[in-house]
Image (spheres, rainbow, N blue to C red):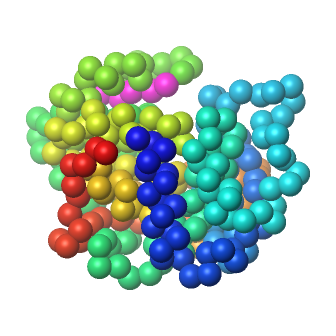
Amino acid sequence: MSKAIVEEALACLSAEVPNLSDITVSRICLGWGYVGAKLSTDDVGLCHSMAAETRFECCHVVQRAGTLSGSSATMLGELAKSWNHGERVIGVATINALSQIVLKKQHERYSVLEGNTLDHVDIRPGESVAMVGNIKPLVPAIKSKTAKLRVFERGGSLEEGVLPDAASEELIPEADLVFITGSAIANGTIGRLLQLSGKARHVILVGPSASMVPDPLFKRGVDLIGGVIVTNPEIAMQVVAEGGGTPQLKAATRFVVIKPTSSGERQRNFA
């Protein structure tokens, strides 16, 4: 199903981005924290680097390194369906770059609002919250509203109170609200996670990696996306190149919340 989400996102972009066939990728940067894709339109898309999950072949991550710049944006966007993590993150970053063109427009199906994610989420006392990915800036605010927070993380040493991601199969279906890191798009787990979240009152996708055209995600039950609009392409690409993360990207982005309008309410379709 993750492949289907990518295919639907590419179809949306094909329908909504003017002169899509003429747009190329002028620069790709694989940083330690994020991957950046800059288009010939000057739009920049970001994706988590997934460095901890990426396999190095000899000394390279991407076989085609050195030939990506100048490629068709739609061709690199197709890499988001690859089973190679190095290629997949480039594909997602490219889709997110093309999505910037769409997100800057006015839409009937959804709204793009300024602000932080939690300003738009109603967490009721006593509700259980599942968080896929240890999204640390959100943790204190969620804990101030409910004591029932379970955080799931993949790989590495786990902090106290953080569960391995394998536990999500059993525990996410019990949650009233589910927060999912946008990195789930990059590592291909987003489809299954949305299936597990089918009974939740709210499903929220968070992070620069989630800054994609939202239609395929709303179709599968996502209520809200907390993403970014890149406002300074040069600084954003420099931050990526120098190993920066979300705190450093604040100087080159504005945080936005993407919500369906009343005419485009979320659905529960897991096809």
Along the line of sight, the residue nearer the viewer: 102 or 156: 102
Locate residue 55: give its quadrant: top right
Q: Position of residue 11 (x, y in %)?
A: 48, 64
Residue 198 makes an appearance in the image: yes
Q: Quadrant of the C terminus?
A: top left
Residue at screen point 66% across, 35% down: 84
Along the line of sight, the residue nearer the viewer: 247 or 163: 163
Q: Which secondary structure dominates the residues rendered in magenta?
A: strand
Is residue 152 located in the magenta-colored stretch of the structure?
yes
Locate residue 49: give its quadrant: top right
Along the line of sight, the residue nearer the viewer: 14 or 105: 14
Residue at screen point 25% across, 49% down: 269
Does residue 36 lie above or below 158 as drawn? Answer: below
Residue 33 makes an appearance in the image: no
Q: Which residues are magenta?
A: 149-154
Q: Position of residue 205 (x, y in %)?
A: 37, 49
